[in-house]
């Protein structure tokens, strides 16, 4: 059973069903990944409720350096940011490789929405890359 099937068989609340519909509409516009990610974030932000639903988090973004001349592909850090409590941000390929960690001592909540059918296209979530020296 796919996530989509599960969500549509009665487990989704009305609020979630509306959000899913709005995200699908944003993705269906067929824009490049970066503006699509931000459009999806705009659909999510008003539905989050209280500011403290999403906690603050640290994020390190990476650029993938492809393998070359027998060397393995590796990641190079490009930016460190702190996403304040309640922040919505969008990432899109190729700049979507990132590491996040809790900015505080409370339980951290981070919501990721993928604008692709991961059951069909696969996911990069569990890929492992060598870190560049010094990271």
Image (spheres, rainbow, N blue to C red):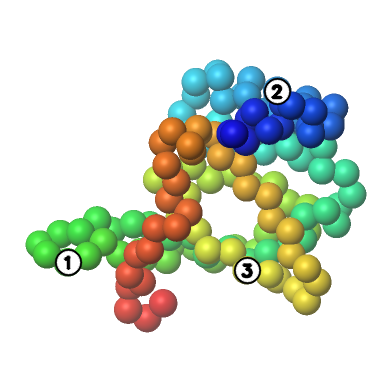
Which mark, by number, is residue 8? Answer: none
Task: Between label 2 and label 3, give the one nearer the viewer.
Answer: 2
Image height of 128 relative to 23, above or below = below
Sequence-first disc among 3 and 1 = 1
Between 39 and 116, the one nearer to me in the picture: 116
CA gap between label 2 and label 3 equals 30 Å
Between 9 and 95, the one nearer to me in the picture: 9
Name the element at disc 2: helix
CA gap between label 3 and label 1 equals 29 Å
Q: Residue at x 34, y 57 (%)?
A: 64
Q: Write down the residue under mark 3.
A: 101
Q: Write down the residue under mark 2.
A: 21
Residue 116 image offset from top left, x and y in percent: 50, 33
Side (left or right) of 34 relative to 106: left
Residue 106 image offset from top left, x and y in percent: 80, 71
Q: Write down the residue under mark 1.
A: 71
């Amino acid at each position: 059973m796919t996530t989509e099937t599960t969500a549509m068989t009665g487990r989704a609340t009305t609020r979630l069903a509306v959000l899913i519909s709005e995200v699908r509409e944003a993705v269906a516009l067929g824009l490049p990944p970066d503006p699509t990610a931000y459009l999806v974030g705009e659909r999510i932000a008003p539905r989050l409720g209280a500011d403290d639903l999403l906690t603050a988090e640290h994020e390190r973004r990476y650029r993938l350096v492809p393998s070359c001349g027998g060397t393995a592909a590796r990641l190079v850090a490009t930016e460190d940011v702190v996403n304040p409590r309640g922040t919505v941000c969008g990432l899109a390929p190729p700049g979507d490789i990132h590491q996040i960690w809790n900015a505080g001592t409370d339980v951290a909540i981070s919501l990721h929405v993928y604008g692709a059918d991961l059951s069909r296209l696969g996911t990069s979530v569990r890929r492992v890359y060598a870190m560049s020296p010094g990271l």
